[in-house]
Amino acid sequence: MGYNEYGQLGRGCTSEGLQGARVLNAYARFLDDTPELVKIVRVSCGEYHAAAISENGEVYTWGLGSLGQLGHRSLQSGDKELIPRRVVALEGIVTRDVSCGGVHSCAVTEGGALYGWGGGHVGQLGLGPQNGFFSCALNGSDMLLRNIPVLVIPSGVRLVTCGHSHTLVSMKDGRIYGWGYNSYGQAANEKSTYAWYPSPVDWCVGEVRRLAAGGGHSAVLTDASSLKELCEFKLAETVNRSNARLIEDVASRTGADALARLCEKLREHLVEQGDSELMEMHMVEEIEAKAR
């Protein structure tokens, strides 16, 4: 439901959706070699596109594909898919996790490989300091893209999340790597605007249950039901937090939506305090009080 100018609702049209409606079941007859009913186990929404994984591990994408974020080789600049379409470049590869960013997408296979596609102009594909990793040019312009999935990490990946312009992965050995736009420290430990390649994030302790990434911040839920906030919310130019802060046991007291609620409480706290030293002294107590 919602805004649908680029077909990101997958309904076969561009009219806004004011209420929920079936997508893959309703339009399965339009899909290439797809049974009438497709059981979906995961879904992710980007800025103007979306992706889903079927029970069989196939990836479907729809919406705006102007920078290759849909992973369909045939798409040209400005093209869009109004109904879900299978990513044939991943045919024969069983996929278990998928995430959409602003103009890029990533998927994790059953064997732990990570594939990425779409725009990579700020490093969000993890392929180096270039304007994407290229398989074609956009109508003769100097802006290039990766319009089909490319292997980023060959093995060991368990989870992936794409922020607007950065990416985080959790590895099977417990490590976390990030890359992409890093102006606020949301993607990596390194103090640089762009993290062009997968860089270790060394502050997390314990097995990772969930990853979440926004525009300029990221968060991780660990097996101890604690949360680590990775970076700043840029509420004011004077506030800059690049070091993560462990908030013990907040998740267990805020329920299943702990990540979203904690981010909102931290946001409120920064607005109210505006002082990083005070924030560090009273962070846990005030967030716990607000979360009750």
Image (cartoon, helix red, strand yellow):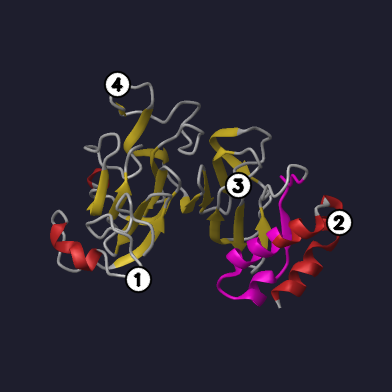
Crowd band around label 4 with a 10 angstrom C-alpha radius: few (<14), some (14–19), many (20+): few
Q: CA distance from mark 3 to mark 4?
A: 32 Å
Q: Which residue is mark 4?
A: 140
Q: CA distance from mark 2 to mark 4?
A: 53 Å
Report the span colored magenta: 239-267
Task: Please report whichever mark, 1 or 4, sits nearer to the chain's N-terminal start.
Answer: 1
Q: Which residue is found at the position 61% from the left and 56% from the top?
A: 219
Closest to the observer, 42 or 169: 42
The amino acid type found where label 2 is placed reads Leu
- Contact between labelled residues 4 and 3, with CB atoms less than 8 Å apart: no
Crowd band around label 2 with a 10 angstrom C-alpha radius: few (<14), some (14–19), many (20+): few
Task: Please report whichever mark, 1 or 2, sits nearer to the chain's N-terminal start.
Answer: 1
Q: CA distance from mark 2 to mark 3?
A: 22 Å
Residue 188 is situated, as x and y percent measured from the top left of the image, at 62, 41
The answer to whether residue 90 is magenta is no
Q: Which residue is mark 3?
A: 216
Task: Please report whichever mark, 3 or 1, sits nearer to the chain's N-terminal start.
Answer: 1
The answer to whether residue 243 is magenta is yes
Q: Which residue is found at the position 45% from the left and 38% from the top?
A: 125
Closest to the observer, 18 or 26: 18
Q: CA distance from mark 1 to mark 4?
A: 40 Å
Residue 271 is situated, as x and y percent measured from the top left of the image, at 75, 57
Residue 264 is situated, as x and y percent measured from the top left of the image, at 65, 63
Q: Which residue is mark 2?
A: 278
The amino acid type found where label 1 is placed reads Gln
Q: CA distance from mark 3 to mark 1?
A: 30 Å
Where is 194 relative to 273, above or below? above
Q: Which residue is mark 1?
A: 19
Quarter of the image for residue 255 reads bottom right
Q: Is residue 223 toward the left or the right of residue 291 in the image? A: left
